[in-house]
Amino acid sequence: MPPVLVIARLTIQEASRRRLLLALVILTLIVVGFSAWGFNKITTVTNGAGQTLPAQQVALITSQLLIVVTFMFSGVLALSAAVVAGPLISSEVESGLLLSMLARPVRRSEVVIGKWLGLGVLVAAYAAGAAFFELVAVDWATGYLPPHPIELTLFVAAEGLVLLSLGLLLSTRLSGITAGVIALVAWLMGWIAGVVGDIGTGLQNQA
C-alpha cells in the first residue's frame, strides 16, 4: 500500500478514537431529530380562518428554514475542520512524533497529503451523512425536498475541505491554535462578505 494511503488510514483511525467525532455524530442526530419535529409543526400551523397552510406556503417556509439549518451544519463542519486541522502538523512536530516518521523512507509531502486525505474523507462523509439524514427528516415532516440536493451536499463538503486545507497549510508554519483561529476567521470573513454581497444585490448596488 502506498505511504499516502497508509497515513490516511492511520489518520482516520486516530480521529475515530477521539471523543470529538463521537460527540459530533451524537449532536448531529439530536439536531436532525429536533429539526424534524420543528418542520413537522409547520404543517399543523393554521391561518386566521382556522385552516392549515397550503402546500405552497409550507414549502416556502420550509425552504427558508432549511437554509438556516444548512448554514448551521456548514458552520459546525467549518469549525470542526479548523479545530482538527490546525494542530494536526504542528503538534506532531512539537512532540517529535513527525521526526520519527520522517526518519523512515517517507516524504514530507506524503505525510501532509495522507493526513489531508484521511481527514478529507471524514469531512466528506460527515457532510454526506448530515445532509442525507436532514433531507430525509424534512421530506418526512413536510414532503419538501430542495431542487438540487446533490449540489447542496457537495457545496457543504467543499466548504469543509477548503477550511481543512487552509488549516492544514497554516499548521505547517504556525502553532496549532494560531492556524485554527486564522482559518476560522477567514471563513467568517468570507461569510460576511457573501452576506454583504447579497444585500448589495438586493439593493441593486453595483459597488
Image (cartoon, grey):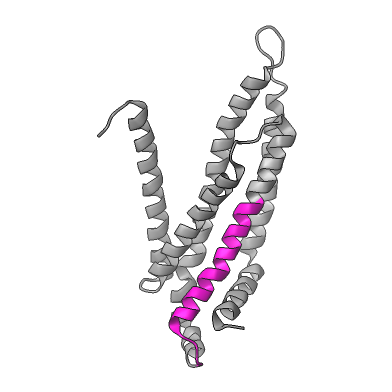
Name the dominant secondary structure of the magenta segment: helix
Magenta stretch containing residue 93, yes or no?
A: no
Q: Residue furthest right?
A: 140
Q: x, y percentage for residue 93?
A: 44, 81
Image: 63 above or below 173: above
Quadrant where the C terminus lies? Answer: top left
Q: Residue at x 47, y 70 (%)?
A: 87
Tell me if 174 is positioned left or right of 112 in this view. left
Q: x, y percentage for residue 103?
A: 48, 93
Q: x, y percentage for residue 142?
A: 70, 30
Q: Quadrant of residue 52?
A: top right
Q: Residue at x 31, y 26 (%)?
A: 204
Numbered range of the magenta stretch: 104-129
Magenta stretch containing residue 114, yes or no?
A: yes
Image: 193 above or below 161: above
Tell me if 36 is positioned left or right of 69 in this view. right
Q: Residue furthest left?
A: 207
Q: x, y percentage for residue 126?
A: 62, 56
Q: Quadrant of residue 175?
A: bottom left
Q: Residue at x 67, y 41 (%)?
A: 135
